[in-house]
Amino acid sequence: GCDMLTCIDFSRCTSLRELGGFERCAALASIDLSACTALRTIDHAFGGCTALATVTLPSAVESIGGGAFVDCHSLTTVDFSRCMALRELGGFQGCGALQSVDLSNCTALTTISSSALEGNRIPTPLKTDSQCGA
């Protein structure tokens, strides 16, 4: 892991298309990917980042794969407000502090993996806007 890493600046990563590899960065507290306008896939990126509390996702992301944010025990907020292109949702298993997600802007969403939000405090069944998956 990368125990001492506290911050990652993605503000100039406008050409980044896939993201992975920052697993078990124990001191990382927040991630803002909103400037990553070409980012399509997040997979096995921040799993086990136990201090990670907030995530802001980019508009172009299409897939959040298994393990993307698994076991981020402090994660309380995930901003999906820009995620109109999101088709597949997974990867938030074991985020015990996560109590709600708003997928109402995810109009392209067609697949939520059966274990996507397992081990969270989100009420089931998951409530989504009637437009999701349309």
Image: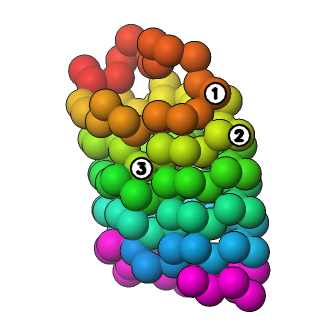
Q: CA distance from mark 1 to mark 3?
A: 15 Å
Q: Depth check: 27 or 131 in front?
A: 27
Element at label 1: loop
Q: Amino acid at mark 3?
A: Gly
Evaluate if marks 1 and 3 touch, with contact meaning CB atoms under 8 Å apart.
no
Q: Identify the residue under disc 1.
A: 121
Q: Please determine whether, in this image, residue 112 is positioned above or below residue 33.
A: above
Q: Please determine whether, in this image, residue 92 is positioned above or below residue 52.
A: above
What residue is drawn where x is 54% and y is 45%?
94
Residue 100 drawn at (x, y percent): 63, 28
Element at label 3: loop
Evaluate if marks 1 and 2 touch, with contact meaning CB atoms under 8 Å apart.
yes
Q: Depth check: 27 or 83 in front?
A: 27
Q: CA distance from mark 2 to mark 3?
A: 15 Å
Q: Identify the residue under disc 2.
A: 97
Q: Please determine whether, in this image, residue 102 is positioned above or below residue 77.
A: above
In this view of the protein, can residue 35 be seen by the observer?
A: no
Residue 39 drawn at (x, y percent): 37, 67
Q: Please determine whether, in this image, residue 34 is positioned above or below residue 118.
A: below
What residue is drawn where x is 37% and y is 44%?
90
In this view of the protein, can residue 30 be seen by the observer?
A: yes
What residue is drawn where x is 51% and y is 56%?
69
Q: Amino acid at mark 2?
A: Ala
Residue 118 drawn at (x, y percent): 47, 34
User: Is residue 118 rendered to the left or right of residue 97?
Assistant: left
Q: Quadrant of residue 112?
A: top left
Residue bounds of the magenta highlight: 1-19
* Residue 5 is one of the magenta-drawn residues: yes
Q: Earlier in the sequence, mark 1 or mark 2?
A: 2
Which label is found at residue 91? 3
Q: Amino acid at mark 1?
A: Arg
What residue is drawn where x is 27% and y is 24%?
133
